[in-house]
Image (tube, rainbow, N blue to C red):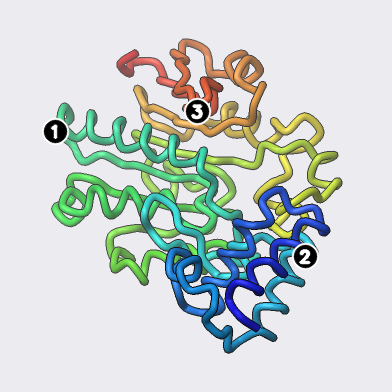
């Protein structure tokens, strides 16, 4: 099969299966199978595809609804290659906003606080956000000015996070913990100054429908209960006891959840929003009593 014919065939196959982006998906899979970038493929439609059977198998997986990130085994996120598989949620574009807000918060604290800053990412999943923070603040982590903890309730997800941290050479400066939310804080682990969390916030009925990648990603990383707020509700109720006075929590939310989360915020806390590029409130900043607003 020639490259040009493979693109046409793959596009048709995925269009008929209901893919929202059949041409792009076909080109990405063809690039993965052939080891050539998409620009080369488009410039050489007459070239022979040596691995037609492998390409066909990848198309079948995609046509069945499996995410491309699982087929390729990685997701390109914030210019990083994040290893991905069924052990954890695939990093989303909207989570880049959470990472940016976290870097801003940690930078501010490092500039104004004399004591070491404790930052904790809850529900780290693949470890993508923890990885970004570790790379951004490597000097502060190595000097002991910052401690970074990344936790997850899933041992499988933590294993994947460890692999991603190791691939990028920062495994020694991130503490991994298997934990249910902030349960060990103040006990076996220190109370955090900054908490970053992308908790499950999809309603159970939507997870049950298994549309798109939801049919393949781990339910524990998606299911937020009947209204999508079960984990957020538990987290916010426990926050005053687990974090230091004046701590800041940064949470990624689902669309339309901001009002409910604002109402659940701990007494005396300040609440502000970080909208995404579409103007939707996707990250909420909760400043506990004593923090800057």
Q: Which mark is residue 114?
A: 1
Nearer to the camera, 186 or 288:
288
Disc 1 is placed on an element classified as: loop
Q: How many labels sit on residues?
A: 3
Find residue 250 and report its image quarter. Answer: top left
Q: Point out the tag, 1 or 3, that comes first from the N-terminus.
A: 1
In the picture of the structure, the residue carrying the numbered disc 2 is: 13
Front disc: 3 or 2: 2
Q: Position of residue 107 (x, y in %)?
A: 23, 34
Disc 2 is placed on an element classified as: helix
Q: Residue at x 51, y 66 (%)?
A: 74
Left of 255 or right of it: where is 164? left
Q: Taking the image as drawn, is residue 155 in sight? A: no
Label 1 and label 2: CA atoms lie apart by 59 Å
Q: Point out the tag, 1 or 2, that comes first from the N-terminus.
A: 2
In the picture of the structure, the residue carrying the numbered disc 3 is: 283
Front disc: 1 or 3: 3
Front disc: 1 or 2: 2
Q: Residue at x 43, y 59 (%)?
A: 176
Location of the C terminus (image quadrant): top left
- Assess whether mark 2 and mark 3 are in contact (beta carbons under 8 angstroms): no
Relative to 281, does residue 219 appear above or below in the rendering?
A: below
Q: Position of residue 85 (x, y in %)?
A: 60, 67
């Amino acid at each position: 099969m020639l490259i040009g014919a493979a693109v046409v065939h793959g596009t048709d196959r995925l269009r008929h299966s209901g893919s929202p982006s059949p041409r792009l998906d076909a080109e990405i899979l063809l690039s993965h199978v052939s080891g050539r970038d998409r620009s080369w493929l488009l410039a050489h439609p007459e070239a022979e595809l040596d691995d037609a059977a492998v390409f066909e198998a990848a198309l079948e997986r995609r046509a069945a609804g499996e995410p491309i990130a699982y087929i390729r085994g990685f997701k390109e996120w914030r210019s990083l290659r994040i290893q991905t598989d069924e052990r954890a949620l695939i990093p989303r574009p909207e989570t880049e906003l959470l990472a940016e807000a976290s870097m801003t918060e940690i930078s501010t604290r490092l500039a104004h606080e004399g004591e070491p800053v404790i930052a904790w990412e809850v529900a780290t999943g693949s470890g993508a956000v923890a990885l970004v923070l570790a790379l951004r603040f490597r000097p502060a982590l190595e000097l002991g000015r910052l401690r970074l903890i990344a936790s997850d309730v899933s041992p499988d997800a933590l294993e994947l996070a460890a692999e991603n941290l190791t691939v990028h050479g920062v495994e020694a400066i991130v503490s991994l913990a298997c934990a249910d939310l902030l349960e060990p804080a103040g006990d076996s682990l220190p109370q955090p100054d900054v908490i970053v969390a992308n908790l499950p916030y999809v309603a159970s009925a939507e997870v049950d429908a298994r549309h798109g990648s939801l049919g393949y990603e781990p339910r524990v990383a998606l299911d937020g209960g009947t209204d999508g707020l079960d984990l957020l509700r538990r987290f916010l109720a426990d926050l005053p006891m687990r974090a230091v006075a004046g701590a800041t929590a940064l949470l990624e939310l689902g669309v339309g959840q901001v009002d409910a989360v604002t109402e659940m915020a701990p007494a005396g806390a300040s609440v502000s929003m970080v909208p995404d590029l579409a103007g939707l409130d996707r990250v909420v900043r909760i400043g506990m009593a004593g923090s800057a607003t």
